[in-house]
Amino acid sequence: MDYTGDPAGAHAYLDAASAAPLHPVAREALLASLADGWADPSRLYAAGRRAQQLRDASTAVVAELLGVRADELTFWPSGTAAAQAAVLGGLGGRKRAGRTLVHSAIEHSAVLHAARTTEAVEVGVDRVGRLDLDAWAAAVRGDGVALASLIGASHEVGTIQPVAAAAQLCAEAGVPLFVDAAQVVGRAEMPTGWSLLSASAHKWGGPPGVGVLVVRKGVRWLSPYPQDDLHRPGNPGALGLPQVVAAAASLRAVVGEAAAEAVRLGALVDRIRERVAATVPDVEIVGDPVRRLPHLVTFSCLYVDGEALLHALDRHGFAVSSGSSCTSSTLRPSHVLEAMGVLSHGNVRVSLHRETTEADVERFLAVLPELVAGIRKEAGL
């Protein structure tokens, strides 16, 4: 096979960790809500009251599915906005305690960007990407710690973090814990023990433009934005209500499908892990082999240019992602892979979704070894 050749067969989207395809229920709800969800829900006239009903019903649905109170949950323009509001607002509400943020070394870049605005202590992970709990315990007990942040599951390698244990250590130290649950909601069991949580609708099959922020009652939060009520979490801008309605409807559908999909996609991911290790020389499968998201697998290929491999896969009809330096805007290796101390060259992240078929996976596994071999041969290796 010529690895620079034309795509073989149908296109297969295998990058659900970036954005899952829109769930059919989300599409239906979005179209249906356009007629009633355009008005300002804060107004008292009929159209405003109808919009308020849609907003309140959507809030109640998402809150129920996340196991929280409706008045603890607000919608934001994106998962990034919600995560940064959690961090900045959580720090602002705890100014008297200090200004230090404790976070894992594998947080999403949105959290790391927020961390640069204050004092920060970074806690490492082991080679499978699991938090060092001993180092975490020491860090959260430090002087001036205002907030801790731990991603629920790695967006790059799929390792599920020990949130409950980390939360217990935070509780003993009197430090609130923020959890970025963007990859967990609708995919795996919800973490427990946290004080603040964020999620992103387009990760579970809802529309883009909807983030979720939960701030538990009793947790001090101060808005990082100028607005009327600085102590009550809320996006200061207008709400994209039709998208919110679609997000809520799709989350209900996704949660209902989650158990069956975890089994189906987990079996396909197991197949990828086994076959890639067996058919591609000099490859490292990264991430926890057991405590991981059911739909995601990441591997790195030695002596392979990551960008060249992604382009070759794209030409053959496969949309995948990477954490290698060749695909980073900063021209640096992925901070997640770097923190784990694993191979980052030729890195490929495959993340499956409800529309992924066994045939898609089989075709990917058939094409990949020859593409890797072709790139290595062209490089003279």
Image (tube, rainbow, N blue to C red):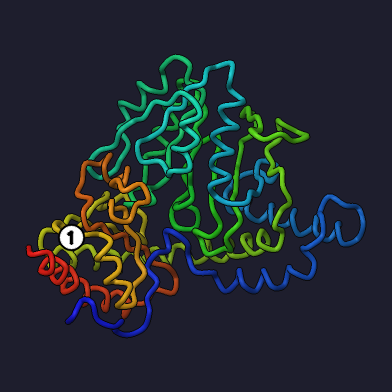
* Residue sitting nearer the eye, 322 or 140: 322
Q: Is residue 158 left or right of residue 101?
A: left
In the rendered image, which residue does mark 1 sit on? 304
Residue at 41%, 38% in the rendered image:
163
Q: Residue 181: x and y, percent?
A: 48, 47
Residue at 54%, 39% in the rendered image:
84
Position of 5 relative to 129 (above/below):
below
Q: Residue 359: x and y, percent?
A: 31, 80
Q: Residue 263: x and y, percent?
A: 36, 65
For the view shown, which residue lies furthest in the left direction? 381
Numbered label tally:
1
Q: Residue 125: x and y, percent?
A: 29, 37
Quarter of image, res 366: bottom left
Residue type highlighted by circle 1: Val
Q: Is residue 342 left or right of residue 148?
A: left
Q: Is residue 122 left or right of residue 182?
A: left
The residue carrying pointer 1 sits among few (fewer than 14), some (14 to 19) or many (20 or more) residues within 10 Å by Cα, namely many
* Residue sitting nearer the eye, 168 or 281: 281
Position of 307 relative to 107 (above/below):
below
Quadrant assignment for the N terminus: bottom left
Q: Is residue 274 left or right of residue 162?
A: left
For the view shown, which residue lies furthest in the bottom direction? 9
Quarter of image, res 58: bottom right
For the view shown, which residue lies furthest in the right direction? 45
* Residue sitting nearer the eye, 175 or 104: 104
Quadrant assignment for the C terminus: bottom left
SS at mark 1 in the image: loop
Residue at 47%, 22% in the rendered image:
100
